[in-house]
Image: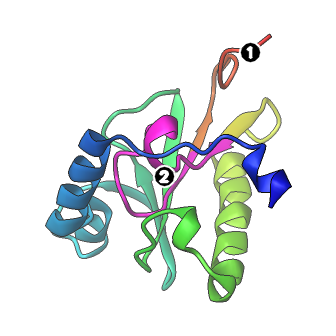
């Protein structure tokens, strides 16, 4: 118990919680892409996942890998999702190679909740590369 008390606890702001609840209620835009209700440039699809170019590209190569199973964040993933999560990582490597960034370098990123900037509450993995990406976050010295 003493150990737990020594770590600060951080939570989501009230405004973020409200925004998150509203977006979850409206449904995932990624599910709408999967169901072909929204357009997307799809680069890969199988029975478990889909990969496509996001609307707002943040690098020369920017792809999203999205499981077809709706998992709001990695926090909601469980043991039965382990194989799917592993397959997502393997697909990231394959897509990096297909896009010519496997040797120059690329970043794989999953944003979880407020402090990481998650704005779509359907688990997704970003693949970013094709140019210098800079540091992920500013260092705290």
Q: Is residue 100 visible?
A: no
Q: Is residue 32 left or right of residue 3?
A: left
Residue 64, label in figure: 2
Residue 137: which quarter of the image? top right
Please identify the quadrant where the C terminus is shown. top right
Which span of residues is magenta-colored?
Answer: 108-126
Q: What residue sits 35% from the left and 45% below the top?
A: 119
Q: Which residue is mark 1?
A: 139
Q: Is residue 80 above or below residue 114?
A: below
Q: How is the model colour-coded?
A: rainbow
Between 97 and 10, the one lying in front of the other is 10
Q: What SS does tag 1 mark? A: loop
Give x and y (percent) for residue 132.
68, 17
Q: Is residue 106 visible?
A: yes
Give x and y (percent) for residue 130.
63, 27
Please identify the quadrant where the N terminus is shown. bottom right
Query: CA–CA distance between discs 1 and 2?
Result: 26 Å
**Residue extending furthest toward the front:** 2
Q: What residue sits 57% from the left and 64% below the top?
A: 74
Viewer-nearest of labels 1 and 2?
A: 1
Mark 2 nearby-residue class (10 Å; few <14, some 14–19, many ≥20): many
Q: Is residue 25 above or below residue 65?
A: below
Q: What SS does tag 2 mark? A: strand
Between 129 and 124, the one lying in front of the other is 124
Asked if the stretch drawn in magenta spans residue 42, the answer is: no
């Amino acid at each position: 118990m003493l150990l737990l008390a020594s770590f600060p606890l951080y939570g989501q702001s009230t405004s973020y919680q409200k925004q998150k609840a509203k977006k979850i209620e409206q449904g995932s835009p990624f599910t709408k892409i999967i169901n072909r209700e929204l357009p997307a440039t799809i680069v890969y699809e199988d029975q478990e996942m889909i990969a496509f170019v996001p609307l707002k590209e943040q690098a020369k190569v920017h792809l999203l890998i999205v499981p077809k199973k709706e998992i709001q964040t990695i926090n909601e993933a469980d043991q039965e999702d382990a194989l799917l999560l592993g397959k997502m990582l393997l697909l990231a490597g394959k897509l990096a190679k297909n896009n010519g960034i496997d040797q120059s370098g690329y970043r794989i990123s999953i944003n979880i909740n407020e402090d990481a900037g998650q704005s779509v509450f359907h688990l997704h993995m970003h693949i970013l590369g094709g140019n210098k990406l800079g540091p992920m976050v500013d260092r705290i010295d």
